[in-house]
Image: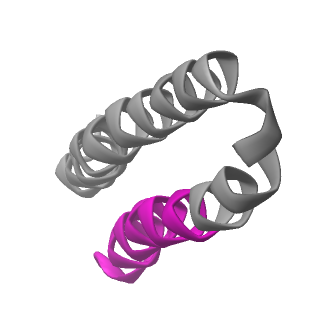
Amino acid sequence: MDITMLAKAVAIGLGSIGPGIAIGMIGSKAMEAIGRNPEASGKVFVPMLIASAFAEAIAIYALVIAFSIK
C-alpha cells in the first residue's frame, strides 16, 4: 500500500469529522427552534442553510488537500 494513499485517506477522514458533527448539530438545533416556535421557521431556515454551507466548505477544503497530496 502506498503511503500517499494512506495520507489522502487520513486527510479526508479527519477533515470530514468536524463538519459532519457541525452539520448534525446545526440541523438538530434548527429543528428544536422550529419545534418551539413554528412561526419562526422562515427566520431560522436561511441562517441554518448558510451555517451548513460554511461547515460543508471545510469538508471541501479537506478534500482539496487530500487531492493535492502527491
Give yes or no for residue 60 being in the magenta stretch. yes
Q: Position of residue 57 (x, y in %)?
A: 49, 72
Residue 13 lies in what quarter of the image?
top left
Q: Which residue does the image show at 32% across and 54% down from the upper left?
A: 8
Q: Identify the residue shown where x is 71% and y is 66%.
A: 46
- Horizontal and vertical percent for residue 52? 56, 57
Q: Please state, as top left, top right, bottom left or bottom right, where the C terminus lies in the image.
A: bottom left
Q: Nearer the viewer, residue 47 or 42?
A: 42
State whether residue 67 is above or below residue 38: below
Q: Which x, y percent locates residue 2?
A: 27, 46
Screen quadrant of the N terminus: top left
Nearer the observer, 13 or 31: 31
Residue 9 part of the magenta-drawn span? no
The answer to whether residue 57 is above or below residue 56 is: below
Between 54 and 8, the one lying in front of the other is: 54
The correct choice, above or below, for 57 with respect to 41 in the image is below
Residue span colored magenta: 50-70
Q: What secondary structure characterizes most of the magenta part?
A: helix
Q: Is residue 29 left or right of residue 43?
A: left
Residue 15's place in the image compared with 58, above or below, is: above
